[in-house]
């Protein structure tokens, strides 16, 4: 199977990663799963990897999604331009504004419908 594009999913909840992996793979995408911010950044900034989109949780141990997003956007790496969709339960207006100000391209609230995720994915890289 030829995949459309590679999507990096950074989320500490295994069941969320697994559902997204299965659903995105079914749609022809190549999902890459990372369980925390530092591992996600390591993968993203590795020159041998190419990622077209990032789906990023906010509430994670070690480094939250806002910190990960800031590290992505302030890097000198070409990956700093990669579209990022925040997928989170942080539903307060201030959280959405914080994510968008730090450079998120989209913000989806948990619990989510996969059709909403897919629509955003296709909007950015489809």
Image (spheres, grey):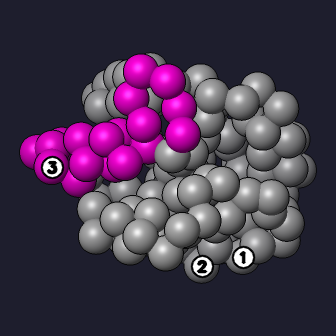
Q: Residue at x 41, y 70 (%)?
A: 94
From the top left corner, tell me how far across and down residue 2 is, in percent.
Answer: 74, 47
Image quarter in which the C terminus is found = bottom right
**Residue, disc 3:** 74
Q: Residue at x 30, y 31 (%)?
A: 45
Q: Residue furthest left?
A: 76
Work out whether mark 3 precedes mark 2 in sequence or the reverse, and give the earlier one: 3
From the top left corner, tell me how far across and down residue 51 is, in percent.
Answer: 46, 45
From the top left corner, tell me how far across and down residue 92 is, in percent.
Answer: 54, 68
**Up/down of 15 relative to 4, above or below:** above
Secondary structure of residue under mark 2: helix
Image quarter in which the N terminus is found = top right
Q: Is residue 96 left or right of residue 29?
A: left
Say if mark 3 contacts mark 1, CB within 8 Å.
no
Residue 99 among magenta residues: no
The label shown at residue 119 is 1
- Of badges 3 and 2, the one in the foreground is 3
**Residue, disc 2:** 123
- Which span is picked out in magenta? 59-79
Q: Residue at x 53, y 32 (%)?
A: 60
From the top left corner, tell me how far across and down residue 48 is, in percent.
Answer: 36, 26
Occupied quadrant, residue 68 = top left
Residue 103 in view here = no
CA distance for labels 3 and 2:
24 Å
Secondary structure of residue under mark 1: helix
Crowd tier of the residue under label 1, counting other residues whose Cα lies within 10 Å: few below 14, some 14–19, many 20 or above: few
Crowd tier of the residue under label 2, counting other residues whose Cα lies within 10 Å: few below 14, some 14–19, many 20 or above: few
Say if mark 1 contacts mark 2, CB within 8 Å.
yes
Q: Is residue 13 left or right of residue 27?
A: left
């Amino acid at each position: 199977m030829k995949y459309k594009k590679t999507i990096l999913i950074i989320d500490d909840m295994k069941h969320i990663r697994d559902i997204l992996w299965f659903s995105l793979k079914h749609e022809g995408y190549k999902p890459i799963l990372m369980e925390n911010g530092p591992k996600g950044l390591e993968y993203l900034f590795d020159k041998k990897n190419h990622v077209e989109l990032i789906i990023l949780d906010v509430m994670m141990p070690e480094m939250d999604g806002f910190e990960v997003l800031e590290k992505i956007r302030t890097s000198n790496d070409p990956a700093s331009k990669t579209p990022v969709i925040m997928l989170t339960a942080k539903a307060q207006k201030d959280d959405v504004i914080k994510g968008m100000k730090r450079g998120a391209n989209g913000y989806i609230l948990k619990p989510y419908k996969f059709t909403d995720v897919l629509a955003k994915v296709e909007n950015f890289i489809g």
